[in-house]
Image (spheres, coloured by chain):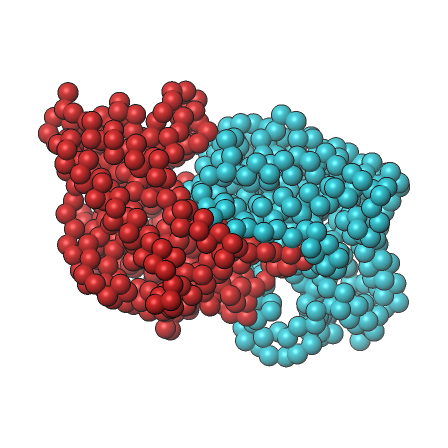
Chain colours: A red, B cyan
Amino acid sequence: MVVARDGSSSPLEESNGTTIPLSNLSYDSFVNVDRGDPVGFRKFWEKLSEEAKVEIKGDEVMSYFGDKNLCWYMLPQMRNAILRLHKVVGNANTEDKYIVLGTGSSHLYLSLLYALSSQKPSHIPFNVVAAAPHYSEYEGPVNILQSKLFQWSGDASVYDKDEPYIELVTSPNNPDGTIRTPVVKSDAEGNVVYDLAYYWPQYTPINHELNQDIMLFTFSKCTGHAGSRIGWALVKDIEIAKKMVLFLHLSSIGVSKESQVRAAKIIEVICDGHENSKSTPSDRLFFEYSKEMMKERWEKLKAAVEQSKVFTLPKYPSAYCHFTKEISEQYPAFAWLKSVEGIEDAESYLEKLKILTRGGKQFGVDAAYVRISMIGTDDEFIELCTRLENAKIE
Amino acid sequence: MVVARDGSSSPLEESNGTTIPLSNLSYDSFVNVDRGDPVGFRKFWEKLSEEAKVEIKGDEVMSYFGDKNLCWYMLPQMRNAILRLHKVVGNANTEDKYIVLGTGSSHLYLSLLYALSSQKPSHIPFNVVAAAPHYSEYEGPVNILQSKLFQWSGDASVYDKDEPYIELVTSPNNPDGTIRTPVVKSDAEGNVVYDLAYYWPQYTPINHELNQDIMLFTFSKCTGHAGSRIGWALVKDIEIAKKMVLFLHLSSIGVSKESQVRAAKIIEVICDGHENSKSTPSDRLFFEYSKEMMKERWEKLKAAVEQSKVFTLPKYPSAYCHFTKEISEQYPAFAWLKSVEGIEDAESYLEKLKILTRGGKQFGVDAAYVRISMIGTDDEFIELCTRLENAKIE
């Protein structure tokens, strides 16, 4: 989608760790690849529109309560869908873990900051760190809450305080797609949170069944249903899981039941397909279709970037994927472009070409970098490639 | 519903401002009227089960985005439904107001604490106050966040600091059903937040179209659909509304689209009925049915309480309701019982009768009081009345 920059279809962008509504500038035809709205997967769901349909009657899912487990607002079918999905994909070990459901993984992130830091009141404030470049929206929520429990402390790779910390490990990483492990070298008390939003077969080979103590997932980036605001955490320690549930109770009394009904259905359709992959056409297998889409887009983007000679892209190693049973490259949800010498501010450079991106500074690195969404609409993506091809050093 | 107290169907209860999971006690047949789960309205929706049904196809509402307005994640039909509902009921003036949608009104409450206190960084921390008895879950979220921006300061009626404050005015009040106005007498900088969760015709005569600067509503207590986690704020000041939206963006990237689709449909069915009330049977008019239900329950409860002579109930004035066009009593969502002399801890007393309630101390008053939900299931309510009738002073 090529959108107008009028404060409407792109109302928020981030700057200096806080997010502010756009002013009412009105100039047309901006390609907005700043946001990570995963609507590129909609074409798949159009084909399965009826099959993945849910009906919710007037008297259904009215209660606050859902389940008889620790996460008391979770519906049984939501829990079962999460367990089944991880089993089918093989990306995370769910055994001996508590599932905590959140209104997207942002909400779970906040609940974790509370859960981890409040466990040790004598150690507060905990320092929240992530290796740069890191997700641009880790810092904003920490700053907005102004909690005495935790504080943003920036790049994990240079963290050297002798104070308790929470390290966020996003793998594959947003924005740069790299596979990550913890980097903090401090001997202080530390907790690691694995944000695995992109550890799905369309983005990266699934070469390990991860089994970390705290793992975060989001429905948005897995299936493309960002509007549902469903995320989940797999948590080993019951005390941490209880504190997360308490936070989610006090801040929103749980998570939408309608979204849970919907997410469970969508996941069921995906799993039904892949569990019967021999009798299902490949364009109706979600991870096959979406991986193919990502692969095609990456090939187009690479060609456009090579032609322009203004930017470079990271190189990713290939790996064996236990899910697809083949050796494969990575096709990250975002492209991480670095401008060549002579262009110091890549975001401003691209803005002149009417391409809206998110600049490196928002990810804790320099302005030579920009992040570009690879999961928007086809129109948007094609127009992006055309404009990139025509980019020239002035 | 008569439930087992086994940590499953009543997993959370509050104590000293924090909420903790119940231990795994296992004794049967407790009537749980501690919680305000509004499932008593389900019988109405069973009749309109098909009429109020929503269908969401696999490819619908996938984006983060919803609308072209300030609250960018709100769907147009959600906005229109809110405006229409207030017009039909006449309880709040929506003109010149911004609508901010939240994951229930708890989430909006937090967003408001941020929005109001961060406006004046030189004045922090703001003191959050509410006249006792006040809603038991105002304090917990403030304490859990441990923000430098605001702090819980208890009973508004005794607030006398010369420091900025936020006064929460719940009207009709939870727990005691009284109609409230602000009570803080301090000359300090103050903001008033009206929590109007119960300002609907089934609970109280709608005798004014309220037109306050900040008004909070929740879908849960209006229609009985607590599982949807939909709340909204009507806010006059655009800067406050923007800050609320920013908070909701950073903490959960908006609100479930499925819940919005559902809530819009439920509200549409209610409004269709009442706008065509002459041609609609009264048992298919939501506010007529639900008011009758509340009235019947209150009559039964009053009879049971009078018979036992162990408790007293508040007396409520009658008033003219512009919506029903008749003079009517109040039928609050909670009964606020005070024990007679000799019973100092009403909650413990009722627990012995296997009735789980929420004691006065959680609402900032003494233990002679308890709150009892009037909006649970029929079974639960009937059993409650039977047990109350048999209550005797030991």
**Residue B76, x across and y down, in percent:** 57, 36
Residue at the location (34% across, 62% down)?
Answer: A214
* Relative to A125, B160 lies left or right: right
- Quarter of the picture containing the C terminus of chain B is bottom right
Residue at the location (55% across, 50% down)?
Answer: B56
Frontmost residue, B103 versus A114: B103
* Relative to A161, A18 lies left or right: right
Q: Quadrant of residue B335?
A: bottom right
Q: Is residue B29 above or below residue A328?
A: below
Residue at the location (59% across, 62% down)?
Answer: A65
- Is residue B388 something one can see in this rendering? no
- Is residue A66 something one can see in this rendering? yes
Residue at the location (28% across, 33% down)?
Answer: A384
Residue furthest left as drawn: A341
- Quarter of the picture containing the N terminus of chain B is bottom right
* Relative to A66, B91 lies left or right: right
Frontmost residue, B15 versus B275: B275
**Residue B293, x across and y down, in percent:** 81, 56
Frontmost residue, A313 versus A342: A313
Q: Quadrant of residue A120?
A: bottom left
* Relative to B295, A191 lies left or right: left
**Residue A252, x across and y down, in percent:** 53, 51
Q: Is residue A237 above or below residue B80?
A: below
**Residue A95, x across and y down, in percent:** 36, 73
The mark total stands at 0
